[in-house]
C-alpha cells in the first residue's frame, strides 16, 4: 500500500487548517504558502472535503475555511477517505479477485494489513496531532517562513511599481 500525494496533502492541509482556524477562517492561499502545495490542487481537495462535511467555507472579506466539526471528531482515516484515497494493501482493491477472479494466496495477509492501517489512522484525530509539541513548533515556523515570503513579494511589487513610475 502506498499513500499518494492526494492523501498526504489532504491530511497536511486539514492539520494546518485545524491549527490556524482556531482564531479566524483560513484561506487556501495561506495553506498553500505554508505547506508549499499548489493552490489549484488544494481547491480540488477542499471541494471533496467540503462534500464530506469536514470543512465549511465562509465567503467575503475575512472569509476562508474552518473545520466543520471539532478537531477531536475528525480522524485521519476519514480525511483520506474523503478525498477518495484507498487505504488498501491488496492489489485487487479488497475484491478477492486478484488471481483468476479468485483470492490469491496472500489475500488475507494484505487485507489484515489494510485493516490494521485503517484502524491505526481511525484512532488518530486532528486534536491528537495538535497536542504534539513538535507539530506546534513546525506550524509556528511555517507561519514565520510564509510571512517572510509574503514580505519579499510585497517588496518586489513595490520596487516594480517604483521603477514604472521612474
Image (cartoon, rainbow, N blue to C red):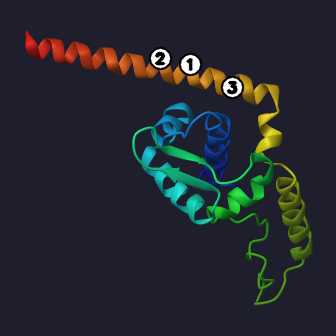
Which comes before the other along the chain, label 3 or label 2? Answer: 3
Q: Secondary structure at mark 2?
A: helix
Residue lying farthest to the top in this orientation: 166
* The quadrant where residue 141 appears: top right
Q: Where does label 3 land, which residue?
A: 138
* 64 lies above or below 33: below
Q: Nearer the viewer, residue 72 or 155?
A: 72
C-alpha span from label 1 to label 3:
10 Å
Of the 4 image quadrants, the one containing the N terminus is bottom right
Q: Position of residue 152 (x, y in %)?
A: 38, 16
Of the 4 image quadrants, the one containing the C terminus is top left
- Residue at position x 74%, y 30% from top? 135
Residue lying farthest to the bottom in this orientation: 101
- Do the numbered discs 2 and 1 sit on residues whose CB atoms are within 8 Å? yes
Q: In the visual, does 166 lie left or right of 11?
A: left
Q: Position of residue 6 (x, y in %)?
A: 59, 54
C-alpha span from label 2 to label 1:
6 Å
Q: In the visual, does 106 lie left or right of 61?
A: right
Q: Nearer the viewer, residue 81 or 95?
A: 81
Q: Secondary structure at mark 1?
A: helix
Which comes before the other along the chain, label 1 or label 3? Answer: 3
Q: In the visual, does 43 lie left or right of 143?
A: left
- Do the numbered discs 3 and 2 sit on residues whose CB atoms are within 8 Å? no
Q: Where does label 2 land, which residue?
A: 148
Q: Where does label 1 land, which residue?
A: 144
Q: Secondary structure at mark 3?
A: helix
- Residue at position x 83%, y 61% from top? 118
Amino acid at each position: 500500500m502506498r499513500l499518494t500525494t492526494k492523501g498526504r496533502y489532504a491530511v497536511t492541509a486539514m492539520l494546518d487548517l485545524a491549527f490556524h482556524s482556531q482564531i479566524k477562517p483560513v484561506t487556501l492561499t495561506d495553506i498553500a504558502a505554508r505547506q508549499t502545495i499548489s493552490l489549484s490542487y488544494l481547491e480540488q481537495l477542499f471541494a471533496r472535503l467540503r462534500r464530506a462535511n469536514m470543512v465549511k467555507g465562509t465567503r467575503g472579506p475575512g472569509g476562508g475555511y474552518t473545520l466543520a466539526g471539532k478537531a477531536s471528531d475528525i480522524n485521519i482515516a476519514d480525511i483520506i477517505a474523503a478525498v477518495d484515497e484507498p487505504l488498501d494493501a491488496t492489489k485487487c482493491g479488497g475484491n478477492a479477485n486478484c488471481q483468476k477472479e479468485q483470492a490469491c494466496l496472500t489475500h488475507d495477509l494484505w487485507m489484515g494489513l489494510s485493516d490494521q492501517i485503517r484502524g491505526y489512522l481511525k484512532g488518530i484525530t486532528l486534536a491528537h496531532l495538535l497536542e504534539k509539541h513538535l507539530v506546534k513548533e513546525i506550524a509556528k515556523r511555517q507561519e514565520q517562513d510564509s510571512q517572510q515570503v509574503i514580505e519579499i513579494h510585497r517588496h518586489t511589487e513595490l520596487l516594480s511599481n517604483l521603477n514604472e513610475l521612474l
